[in-house]
Amino acid sequence: MDRRQFMNTAVQCLSSVAIAGVVPVSVVKVAFANPGADSARDFSFACISDAHLQQIRGNQFVARQEQALQRAVSEINQLHPRPDFVMFAGDLAQLGSRAELDHGADILSGLRSPLRMVMGEHDYYLDLGEHWRDLFGEPGYSFDHKGVHFIVLNSILTCEDWTLHRWQSAERRMAEMTGLDSPRMSPFMVGPAQRQWLQQDLDNTDKTTPIVVLSHAPLQKIRKDWNFWTDDADILQAMLAPFEQVNVIYGHVHQRLHSRVGNIQFNSVEATAWPWPSPQSARQAGSHLPVLTLPMRSATGPGKPAGWQLVNLHNGRVDVTDAPDVQV
Ligand SMILES: [Fe+2]
Ligand SMILES: [Fe+2]
């Protein structure tokens, strides 16, 4: 099956789902053959992100977010060929409560493919990830799949002083970190301990092995005042520079952004909850613009349709299938 056939199949699968509208789901094809050709080694995985499930009271949640995640699970279950696994790219909860995380885990348990999880700041800054870890395990890990080395990083940490000593309550801390433009946020980072683990992991990986890094915050410095930002991104990019092929897939920005820095291709996935505006859509200090070898492009934004995205990791190119192209 070539790329066009793959896209057609994915779109046909979507068409068979009798729903109104489209939930943002990304299908990532890891293609080993030249573009347009096919390889028996090719495989796909699906990505969904940023569900932001918010509890109202008891077992009542904001319906729009809840239903969007349920629909995403349902649509992924209809895919043929079935994705090898599903990545949830962070922000399962809105305020990080046990009820929100439990409800999210319950909905995601309906997936028929194995689930891999990334931690988002909305999952973390209430109890510092304690309940998320109970549900899903450690947020930093790696695994090999069909010749590709996958690395999952927790990119929403910040300095200890901000996290542990600045706020009178955990609820206040969460509120400060979860706004789009809160002036009292602190920049995200992967942090020295995780970077040390990452270096050991990379030391054991052949330089020709394709690498896919999955994170919540972008491992890029896109826009600091919105925290589309990872403070140690430059160090991480330098650590990944010796590898022939690196793709970073991330959530958090609630829109599709594509860019390349050196050897690293970056692709974000959309939010099932709501879209954020483009980082270039409002006043922005020049010093916040990342140095890119491929200009950042946005496929979504205010007024633009959200929907399915197909990412071919062979060449890092992104094939966008927007909602109007899909008959549902
Ligand atoms: Fe989010
Ligand atoms: Fe986020």
Image (cartoon, rainbow, N blue to C red):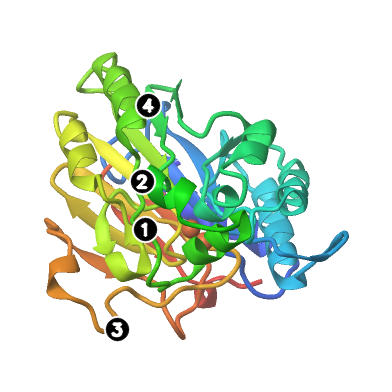
Which residue occupies 26% across, 53% down?
A: 220
Q: Nearer the viewer, residue 252 or 99?
A: 99
Residue linked to disc 1: 186
Image spot of residue 266 (x, y percent): 29, 51
Q: Is residue 96 visible?
A: yes
Tag in front: 4 or 2 = 2
Q: Find out whether the residues at labels 4 and 2 contact each other: C-beta distance under 8 Å.
A: no
CA–CA distance in space, label 4 to label 2? 32 Å
Lower position in the chain sequence, tag 4 or tag 2? 4
User: As displayed, is residue 225 above or below residue 81?
Assistant: below
Q: Residue furthest right?
A: 58
The amino acid beneath tag 1 is: Ser
Is 50 on the left or on the right of 112, as rendered? left
Residue at mark 3 to residue at mark 1: CA–CA distance: 21 Å
Measuring 72% from the left and 44% from the top, which residue is drawn there?
A: 105
Q: Are marks 1 and 2 in contact (CB under 8 Å)?
A: yes
Indicate which disc, 1 or 2, sits on the residue closer to the N terminus. Answer: 2
Residue depicted at 35% across the width and 28% down the height: 193
- The image shows residue 267 at horizontal and vertical percentages of 35, 54
Identify residue type, mark 3: Ala
Q: Residue at x 68, y 58 (%)?
A: 69
Q: How far apart in space, not on screen, are marks 1 and 2 (Cα)?
A: 8 Å
Q: CA distance from mark 2 to mark 3?
A: 28 Å
Beta carbon at label 1 within 8 Å of ligand 2: no
Amino acid on which disc 2 is placed? Cys
Image x and y of residue 275, in percent: 50, 73
Q: Secondary structure at mark 1?
A: loop
